Amino acid sequence: MSDPTEPDDEKIPSFSESLSAAAKQSGFGQLKPGETPTAKSLLAAIGGVRGIAESVLPVIAFLVIYLITRNLLVSVLVPVAISVVFLVVRAVTRSNMTSAVAGAVLLAVSAVLTLLTNNVITNFVPGMVLNAVFLVGLLVSILVRWPLIGVIVGLLYGDMTGWRDEPAKRRILTLATWLWVGLFAVRLAIELPLYFTDNFTALGIARLLTSVPLYALCLWGTWLLVRGVYEGDSSSDDEKDDDEEASTNP
């Protein structure tokens, strides 16, 4: 007989459940079938005002401080300190910390590389590498016929593989994946020439303009595409629920 004082074993989530939970914590987690996207829901999807501040303020601080002081150490440490403050705030308020932790790690890596090379423009290298990794990952997912946006949306809607058997959904979700390929390709097409010409100020401005605004635009486009192919499913589910309710209430 088990000891009643011992806590019951917690159910360990399956791999698919873990992936689904991760997808719901991303910006795509705000996607709902049949729902008309609004500015408010889009703002929530990109992390709200706090999420925008976490993305933009460290970059602005880095640019402004270096242009004014030309002090490399201060310029890279202040953004890291700002990200730590955001992390503490999220911890205190018990908010989702995934994006904040990822941002803080990226800033820390950038700071270390910048100080090691003693070259301010190196600060932008980790971000460009990350864009290249996402670009290649998305292209590979399309080539193997498992477009990444389709996988994410499938996890969100509990449609892990079913969307691949429906030509309309598969085409739209592949198109949505190409949309994100375009985002990372545009970022690299703008930033790489500026990096190789050592144009620090223009590169910093480009990083700001191609971060949150471009991300929000692609998220909005994805939302509209996904809504188009899943709207019918949502309507069918609503009709089914109405029929079940009617049958239980003669």
Image (cartoon, rainbow, N blue to C red):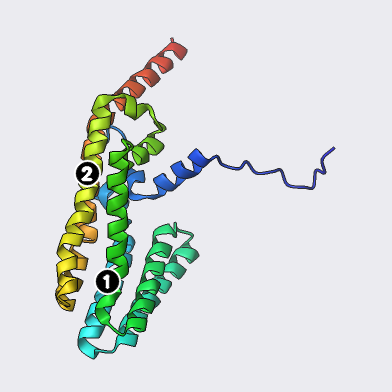
Q: Quadrant of residue 214?
A: bottom left
Identify the residue position indicated by label 2 in the image: 178
Where does the C terminus fall, quadrant-wise?
A: top left
Nearest to the observer: residue 73 or residue 141: 141
On screen, 44 above or below 124? above
Q: Quadrant of residue 77?
A: bottom left
Q: Residue furthest top?
A: 250
Mark 1: few/some/many CA within 10 Å (<14, 14-19, 20+): many
Residue in view at x 28 percent, y 30 percent: 230
Where does the N terminus fall, quadrant-wise?
A: top right
Left or right for 38, reference 107: left
On screen, 244 above or below 156? above
The amino acid pointed to by label 2 is Trp
Could you say which disc has been placed on residue 124 in the image? 1
Q: Secondary structure at mark 2?
A: helix
- Residue 156's spot in the image, x, y percent? 39, 38
- Residue 4's spot in the image, x, y percent? 80, 43
Nearest to the observer: residue 18 or residue 24: 18
* Sequence-wise first label, 2 or 1: 1
- Residue 38's spot in the image, x, y percent? 22, 45
